[in-house]
Image (tube, coloured by chain):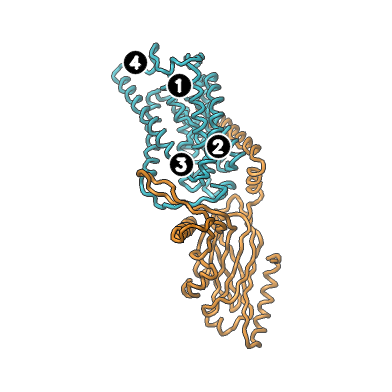
Amino acid sequence: MQIYLPIAELSMNVFFLVGIGGAIGFLSGLFGVGGGFLLTPLLIFTGVPSPVAVASVTGQVVAASTSGALSYYRRGGIDLHLAMYLILSSTLGAFGGVLAFAGLRAIGQLDLFISLLYVVLLGSVGGLMLYESVNALRAARSGAAPALKKSGQHNWIHRLPFKVRFRASKLFVSVIPVVALGAAIGFLSSIMGVGGGFIMVPALIYLLRVPTNVVIGTSLFQIIFTSAYTTLVHASTNYTVDIMLAFLLMVGGVAGAQYGAKAGQKLRGEQLRALLALLVLAVAIRLAIDLFITPPDRYSLSLEGLG
Amino acid sequence: MMPRAGAYGGLLLALSISAASLAHAQAAHEEGIQIGLSTDSIAITAGFSGADLTIFGALEDADPLVARQGRYDVVVVLEGPARPVVVRRKDRVLGMWINMESEAFENVPVSYSVATTRPFQDITDPASYKRLSLGVGNIYMQPAEADQRPATIAEFTAALRQRKAATGLYSENVGGVQFLSQNLFRATVRLAPDVPVGTHKARAFLFKNGMFLKENSAQLEIRKSGFEQAIYRTAHRHGLFYGFLAVGLAMVTGWVGRVVFRKD
């Protein structure tokens, strides 16, 4: 069944859109990522103009992360205090991102910039996570206690000033890295059409040493606000949010997120991290290949004023 | 200038038949061509996935002898609204394929669908097509900057046509024009699923023995239907409100999804 998308100005299959929304929603609930980093490239690949894909996916991310966060909230898996700091700083970052988005689009390098960001970020984040989680899995198998959060073991981040206590995360840390992380994620979020969970989750785990079970809920909670803000900014400056497209993706997404959150409870922290690392790496490799192999068509068209 | 097409079609048919019978009596032939659309606007609804548009037309003062020998040819074009387009070319830099050179064009028709009675080469010669800017390969595209090298412009123009053809926005339907009688013909042109909204121009070209005789045109408005149009208008006129609507819808959907599909 085809449906006409009024902003993207093309027809797409309803079941396809609900289906990919559902699959991505499952991963979203499982890993605490919004899923935008998978969904945006997928939509662009199927012919949705990239400005429309980026902006509409932010809408779907709001829905999937609301659904997932509600599930974690019930289990006490959200650090509201930490989330508040992240939300405020990421809003600032997102505003900067939307400005950069418009600028890059004007000079025709938006796609390149997005691809490079994906490859570099996903590649390094995925690689580091995979390395750590495989080590943790090995240690667990050989009988040693999981040793991610040793008391008394601190990195340089824990020596910075302006310390704040985050009770739910059992954390006493400077606000500087928290705010910097939030701002960076807000910036990326608006440029890449992603909630930033795939960076937020590892950063909270490894840099701030937040327990994995709190990380996922907090990340989802924060993503609701970042992506809601990004949706608003895209809607009012670029007019590229396709509410039909977003809605169909959402319908699948919210259902998938519930199943994902359920599945996530059955896995241990290091198993979850290893799986997320593999997923992130796979996307990075796929995008890197696209950058380096000869494209089937070297020419692309863009309508002035739409992208 | 174009009257309402619905009423026009019937009138046109009557006129052209009487004109054709009159033509018998006359020695010198001054053929003409008329087209009529069954509607002057098409609404794109939620289920739209492309469509075939039928355009009827008639020859005026056609020579029955020439018509019987099938030496009249008709080419019908449906041309979408013109918009500026930028064509970019990827080149290899440090091993990566990056958008480097670009060329901007003004007034490129967003869509261009053409139907003919016979294969292009059988109707007239390439020079005539070029003069008339007729056919996907001959659409005139005005570069935004005139000081570019002709070779570069030619390269990007060809790429532009090729991309448009690949996405189905530019299409050719050989045999898409059929004569129903000596004077009356029917043309079928393709509307792509992502056909642009706006004012489209239907043009009919009449050829006799490979010579271009006459051209006539009619206008067609393609617009989004009520609901789709309302969404589009709201998104553009009340962006912030639309954004809040999208976010609100997302949050409600998220909450409903949680309630309906709850797994714990």
Which kind of residue does numbered mark 2 sit on? Leu
Spot the residue most to the top. Answer: A152
Label 3 and label 2: CA atoms lie apart by 21 Å
Labels 3 and 4 touching (C-beta < 8 A): no
Q: Amino acid at mark 3?
A: Pro
Residue under label 2 = A99
Chain whose colour in the figure is cyan: A
Position of residue A90 measured from the top left corner of the image (x, y, whole percent)? 53, 28
Q: Position of residue B42 (x, y in %)?
A: 63, 58
Q: Colour of chain B?
A: orange
Q: How far separated are the C-alphas under marks 1 and 4?
A: 17 Å
Marks 3 and 1, how far apart at CA: 28 Å
Write the residue at 66% across / 62% down. Answer: B39
- Please state which amino acid type lies under the numbered disc 1: Asn
| Parent chain of label 4 | A
Discs 1 and 2 lie in a common subunit: yes
Give the labeled residue for mark 1: A213
Dot 2 falls on a residue whose secondary structure is helix
Crowding near the residue tagged with mark 1, few <14, some 14–19, many ≥20 C-alpha atoms within 10 Å: many
- In whole angstroms, how far apart are the C-alphas of marks 1 and 2? 34 Å
For residue A41, the mark is 3
Mark nearer the N terminus (3 vs 2): 3
Q: Which residue is mark 4?
A: A145
3 or 4: tag closer to the N-terminus: 3
Q: Nearer the viewer, mark 3 or mark 1?
A: 3
**Subunit bearing disc 3:** A
